[in-house]
Amino acid sequence: MDISAVERVLRDNIDGFSGPVTAEKTASGQSNPTYILSTQGKKYVLRSKPLGDLLKSAHAVDREFRVLSALSKQGLPVPHPYFLSEDLSVTGTMFYVMDFSEGRNFNDPRLNDKSAADRLVIYDAMNAGLVAIHSVDLAAAGLQDYGKAGNYFERQLSRWTGQYRTSETETIASMDNLINWLTENLPPDDGVVTLVHGDWRIDNLLFDTKTNALTAILDWELSTLGHPLADLGSQLMQWAMPVGPDGRGLAGVDRAALGIPSDAEYIAQYAQRRGMSASPDMRFYIAFSFFRMAAILQGVKKRALDGNASNPEKGLKLGTYVGFCAQSGLDTANEGS
């Protein structure tokens, strides 16, 4: 990345900006390369599309910029975005720049260095944050056309099946079977449409180091208008993953001993905050989330094999989880049958 070119753009688009700039690429951001830009007095974050041939509709940093611009005006805890650059002569690809948000990031949902009381506060803040997203007034935020209305899961299933087929490198029977089950068990359209984050999990959030309050919601690449249970299903899916730096899940963890709510408790808490009459049956939504994660990881694997991944070594490692996610989704689908 041409830092001098980026610095010139920062000077032109941020009031009071003062260089010089240094840039550090983060280890995260498998889909969209992410850099921390540091000056003597302030930090910024740059998120860009990757270079190379890209899947259609993927890596939509322009959508990220739009939703951050809307939500920052609505008082949600998101970084303030400064500008979107569509001038490919600067870095070779589209990018945007936003504030650097202060706060603690947790890659491990066990929150190993926290007390049980702290964990309860953090998980409650995460639950409330998800409800806040799903309660955004779309008209007031100017997001009425941020996605298509109706048949959300039908459209998402079609989209991610197409993405998966485009990046498919081998036949995975469990993925084919999961796609068939989801197709045959699509829930009826209940008319509920909200803003959805699209990748709701604890490592996309920042928390205050003293109070444990939610300070920032990050990584809006997959956000759209859709059904709120997609986000809740994504949360529960993540917790079913193996523990550790790759799975970042809670599988096999004694959550009660740690002060972490069970799935049922978290769902009930969400339902109460949303004013729902009862806790929803989440089987389809969790299975769908496993399917979508498998499709995403297949794309990461394909980019790593093609040589244009943000972190090729990590991309190949994450790609080994495609089959696991597909089989986990199928297992979820078959629960109780």
Image: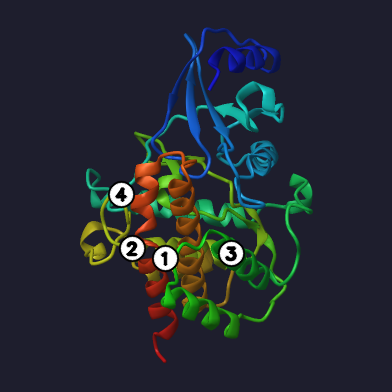
Q: Percent position (x, y) of residue 112?
A: 23, 47
Vertical arrangement, residue 49 with respect to residue 237, above or below: above
Q: Which mark's residue is nearer the viewer, 1 or 3?
A: 3
Q: Percent position (x, y) of residue 293?
A: 47, 61
Q: CA distance from mark 4 to mark 1?
A: 14 Å
Mark carried by residue 160: 3
Q: Is residue 148 left or right of residue 165?
A: right
Of the image marks 4 and 1, the number of the one nearer the N terminus: 4
Q: Are marks 2 and 3 in contact (CB under 8 Å)?
A: no
Q: Which mark's residue is nearer the viewer, 2 or 3?
A: 3
Q: Is residue 88 left or right of residue 175?
A: right
Of the image marks 2 and 4, the number of the one nearer the N terminus: 4
Q: Are marks 1 and 2 in contact (CB under 8 Å)?
A: yes
Residue pictured at 28% horizontal, 65% vertical:
251
The residue tagged 1 is: 237
Amino acid carrying label 1: it is: Met
Quarter holding the C terminus? bottom left
Q: Which mark's residue is nearer the viewer, 4 or 3?
A: 3
Q: Counting other residues with Cα less than 10 Å from the Cα at mark 2, is it few (<14), some (14-19), or many (20 or more)?
A: many
